[in-house]
Image (cartoon, rainbow, N blue to C red):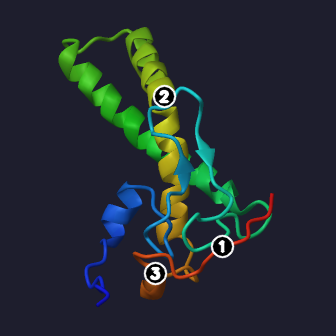
Amino acid sequence: MEKTTTYTISKFQAARQCRCPRCRTGAMFAGSLLSLKGQKMAKYCPHCGLKFEMEPGFFYVSMFVSYALNVAQFISVCIATYVLSGQSESPWVYLIACCLVAILLAGFNFRYARVIQLYWLTPNLRFNPTYYGQKKVKDIKLEA
């Protein structure tokens, strides 16, 4: 007798784990978040075959999402620097702190800007429970 899975991962949890928005099973990125090889996004979902870049230039919107993430991080870092440095008036302290955070969180911003775009800024892309869990499509042919 075959077991059926009734539990599905939540939208937020799947986004946090960088899973495909349609099946919530396949990984969107090769490697880990802290990989030194760089951030490499798959062209297709390895589980359901969804093409992530739906049209040419699709991920240009993620640049604006990444910008918003950077602004939020800079504001947080500047407030933390202000509190921790004893209300420093030197702009160099804030500039160095913001540059360090921008460099350290560049991979995070790249990855999650695309995840946010696919999960919340693409209205015609929804979760399909038939693709969740076990592979439904055998031998998905992917273009090179």
Q: Residues within 10 Å of mark 1 (few under 14, many from 20)?
A: few
Q: Nearer the viewer, mark 3 or mark 1?
A: 1
Kindly identify the residue that appears in the image at 23 percent across and 12 percent down: 85
Q: Where residue 71 sits: x, y (%)?
A: 45, 40
> Between 61 and 129, which is closer to the camera in this rendering?
129
User: In the figure, is residue 73 to the left or right of 85?
Assistant: right
Kindly identify the residue that appears in the image at 54 percent across and 66 percent down: 118
Q: Earlier in the sequence, mark 3 or mark 1?
A: 3
SS category of the residue bearing label 2: helix
| Mark linked to residue 102 | 2
Direction bottom: furthest residue: 1
Say which amino acid is labelled 1: Asp
Whole-number angstrom distance, CA of label 1 to CA of label 2: 40 Å
Residue of label 3: 127
Q: Quadrant of residue 15?
A: bottom left
Q: Where residue 102 sits: x, y (%)?
A: 48, 28
Residue of label 1: 139
Q: Quadrant of residue 137?
A: bottom right
Whole-number angstrom distance, CA of label 3 to CA of label 1: 21 Å
Q: Quadrant of the C terminus?
A: bottom right
SS category of the residue bearing label 1: loop
Q: Are marks 3 and 1 in contact (CB under 8 Å)?
A: no
Say which amino acid is labelled 3: Phe
Kindly identify the residue that appears in the image at 33 percent across and 65 percent down: 12
Q: Quadrant of the N terminus?
A: bottom left
Q: Quadrant of residue 45?
A: bottom right
Relative to 59, say whether 133 is above or below.
Answer: below
